[in-house]
Image (spheres, coloured by chain):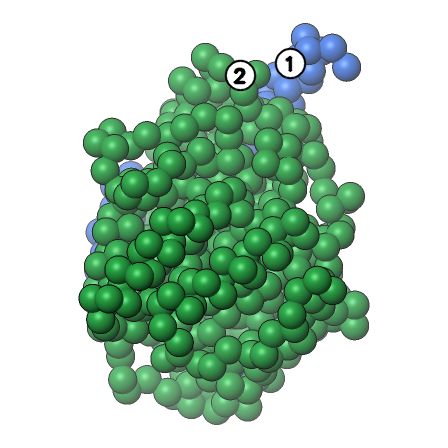
Amino acid sequence: MSEPEAITDERAAAEAVATSMSLAMDELRSRHALTRSPNEWQSLIRSGRA
Amino acid sequence: MGAVAAVTTALELAHGWQPSLNCFVTIDDESAMTRAHQVESKFTSGPLAGLPFAYKDVFTRLHRKSPRAGTNEDFVGSEGAPAAVDDIMRAAGAIDIGSLHLDELAYGATGRNGILDDCHNPWDLQRASGGSSSGAAAVVAARVLPMAIATDTGGSVRVPAAWCGVLGLKPTYSAIPTRGVVPLAPSHDTVALVALQAGVLGDAYRTLSGRPREERLEVANFTVGHLSGAPLGSVDESVARGMAIGARALAALGANVRDLRWPHLDDCNVAAAVVTATEAAAVHGSGWRDRPHRFQGGTRTRLRAGSLLAGVDYVDALRFRGDAIAEALAGPFSEADIVMTPVAPTVAPKLSTVPSPDSPALATGTGTLLAFTRPFNFLGFPCVAVPVGLTPEGLPLAVQLIARPWQEETLLVAAHAMQGLIGWDRWPLPTPAHLPRLEPAEEAG
């Protein structure tokens, strides 16, 4: 396979991977309310308490 | 054994195994011997004094070559200073003899690397070692070194430890400092340890984390939740058999073993994949964009995929992270001191069946391979991969034990008791004909 073909394949594969991850996040959002701040995980690990 | 004798033996074994395993990037004979003489002449004491070990090639080490992280490029830390871990290990009198093989950028789980060539599994040289800490697991499994220091961002210590039949500890997120380590995904990156024996693993963990030994823990007082239900649908028969052996071993040691369900574990893997991909693309973005030809196709594909993700997906993954940690503490870990899961869904595969690291296809199969490990980088909980048996083909089987944050001592006590019962450190490793057959080492602590 020539280099441009390989790069095209990689771009297509990367787009497929990113789309698949994004769709999986859509499904996750449909199952969870996501009420916490994006930083809260750090203090939860530090304290080890819910 | 004194430091000079221990390092001399380790170097001989390292050179003997290297042609078969390709587990080292560098073997630093001269500096290791110099250091061994220094340690011996200063009468340095402590549990790690004189202990030979090696680093996955992502750590900046004093007076050694810069790490290359499995790539074609040197990674020099912003201050060029040694890793925090290197400072601690040198003060403890441990002696590093070289740097170890890994998947490119530590972004992989198979031990295949077209730049370094593949690392091989000492139990079957045609099989994958696992990765990304491929060299760390292979070198300890081959009894070249009693321990190795590596990193784990999604299973990078636990998967190769499981496939190579050794212990792999991923501590609580931030328990061991990451300064001076080439990053992959900083909010998942964890300095992690591989060892053959639980005593050595515990000594190294306590030295590096500065946390004390917990004296009063006993396996007989532990409740162990044996993961059951949907997530196990993806594992092969031998891995399921390993889980049954692990449960029987813990029950035989007096633990109360019960089935446990974890409904949203798969969602943790989904969100963890987004966090890893986004952070890796941000951290290594300039490298692969400016010099794409210097990276393998699989790595480029992963980094490109991460750069395409929406910011809202990354932030929502982090918002879910808090929910998932709280749910784990209030759910599974309100019932159990330890949760037991598989490590990987299969035993070590043949190298010929693992996609080439240059192939974009490598970017699509990692989610399944890391389904049981990456969720716990996302949650930040400590885990240890523990060998439990060999398949009829002589391949290692393992289970993963997980505890609440900062409860590494619970895992170490369980691993120590399981080692006494199962005795993986005495399993006869097939040894290449040109090397002496080794007697099992004495337990060091």
Regarding residue B444, the answer to whether it shows in the image is: yes
Residue in the picture at 48% in, 91% down: B254
Image disc number at residue B140: none
Q: Nearer the viewer, residue B259 or A5?
A: A5
Q: Position of residue B196 (x, y in %)?
A: 50, 70
**Could you say which chain is coloured blue in the image?**
A
What residue type is disc 2 on? Pro
**Could you say which chain is coloured green in the image?**
B
Q: Is residue B305 left or right of residue B174?
A: right
Image disc number at residue A7: 1
Image disc number at residue B292: 2
Q: Position of residue B434 (x, y in %)?
A: 70, 62
Q: Residue furthest top?
A: A4
Count neighbours of disc 2 (C-alpha within 10 A) and say few if under 14, some if 14 to 19, many if 20 or more: some
Answer whether labels 1 and 2 touch (C-beta < 8 Å): yes
Count neighbours of disc 1 (C-alpha within 10 A) and say few if under 14, some if 14 to 19, many if 20 or more: some
What residue type is disc 1 on? Ile
Q: Quadrant of the C terminus of chain B?
A: bottom left
